[in-house]
Image: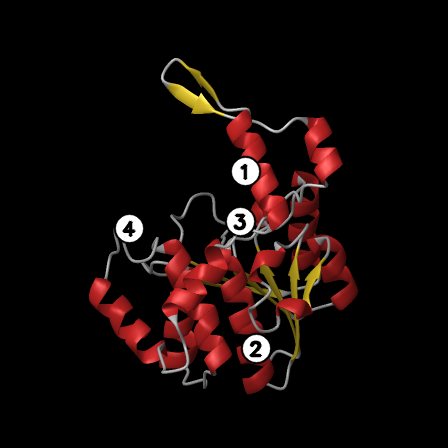
């Protein structure tokens, strides 16, 4: 029954976070009459702009966007703590208080270990390999919402990234491969999605080159760094 739904995922989003928020944005826009808004605090990596509705994600302060949009429901994806949505601890505390004072319902959908999770109206956590898999199980399989080719690409993006191309330890391989089989159509290529996730832009290659140049080895540890001058001159994205 919600009329205004605001979607959040964590700052410095990875492919699973971006796949999750674009998938759910598109799914709710297509299957409900609610006004949907998606937001990530801080800069959003441009390398995943192939995802449908990527351009519709706002880069705003989570607290300010909540106050401006006035949602009656907030859905938090790929994290279970407001401290991963807001970069400043004070902003996270203010957001919690604003939600409480305005009786805003909250749903958390996440697959990470539960550590100091925030309270919410609904908390759904399953042992899935990624949040996009969790969303597919809920919205496509349980609720019966239709998916599109672009939805499937968003889900597969999260799966490929968070499983390391299916080589990480996965709790339920059979279920995962069954989902992948359902999502793959003749016009979707896992190889192409993997390439888009892993590709480097020219400015990113410059950063990698600088990290290799500054590589140090001490006491059986390897580390590298970027100087403030380099970051400023190259206009390195914080994410």
User: Is label 1 in a helix, a strand or a loop?
Assistant: helix
Label 1, label 2: how many angstroms apart (C-alpha)? 34 Å
Q: Where is residue 12 in the image (x, y as percent from the top left)?
A: 58, 48
Q: Would you name the residue on which mark 4 appears? A: 168
Q: Position of residue 188 (x, y in %)?
A: 41, 77
Q: Would you name the residue on which mark 1 appears? A: 208
Label 4, label 1: how many angstroms apart (C-alpha)? 25 Å
Q: Where is residue 216 in the image (x, y as percent from the top left)?
A: 48, 19
Q: Is residue 33 left or right of residue 115?
A: right
Task: Please report the residue visible at 48 percent of the width from the left and 24 percent of the height from the top.
Answer: 223
Task: Please report the residue visible at 55 percent of the width from the left and 35 percent of the height from the top.
Answer: 209
Q: Is residue 92 left or right of residue 84?
A: right
Q: How many labels does the image show?
A: 4
How crowded is the residue under tag 1: few (<14 C-alpha within 10 Å), some, or many (20+)?
Answer: some
Q: Would you name the residue on which mark 2 appears? A: 26
| Labels 3 and 2: the sequence-earlier one | 2
Task: Please report the residue visible at 66 percent of the width from the left and 58 percent of the height from the top.
Answer: 99
Label 2, label 4: how many angstroms apart (C-alpha)? 29 Å
Mark toward the viewer: 4 or 1:
1
Q: Which of 79 and 90 is in front in this view?
A: 79
Q: Where is residue 142 in the image (x, y as percent from the top left)?
A: 37, 80
């Amino acid at each position: 029954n919600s009329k205004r739904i605001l979607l959040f995922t964590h700052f410095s989003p990875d492919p699973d976070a971006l796949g999750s928020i674009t998938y759910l944005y598109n799914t709710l826009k297509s299957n409900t009459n609610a006004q949907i808004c998606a937001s990530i605090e801080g800069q959003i990596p441009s390398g995943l702009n192939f995802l449908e509705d990527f351009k519709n994600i706002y880069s705003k302060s989570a607290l300010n966007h909540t106050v401006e949009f006035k949602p009656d429901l907030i859905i938090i994806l790929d994290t279970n703590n407001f401290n991963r949505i807001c970069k400043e601890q004070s902003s996270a505390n203010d957001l919690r208080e604003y939600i409480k004072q305005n009786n805003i319902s909250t749903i958390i959908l996440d697959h990470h270990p539960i550590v100091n999770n925030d309270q919410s109206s609904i908390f759904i956590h399953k042992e899935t390999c990624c949040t996009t898999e969790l969303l597919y199980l809920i919205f496509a399989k349980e609720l019966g919402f239709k998916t599109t080719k672009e939805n499937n690409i968003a889900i597969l993006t999260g799966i490929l990234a968070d499983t390391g191309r299916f080589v990480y330890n996965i709790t339920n391989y059979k279920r995962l491969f069954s989902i992948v089989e359902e999502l793959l159509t003749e016009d979707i290529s896992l190889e192409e999605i993997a390439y888009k996730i892993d590709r480097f832009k020219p400015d990113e290659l410059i950063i990698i080159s600088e990290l290799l140049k500054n590589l140090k080895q001490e006491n059986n540890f390897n580390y590298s760094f970027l100087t403030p001058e380099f970051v400023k001159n190259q206009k390195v994205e914080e994410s």
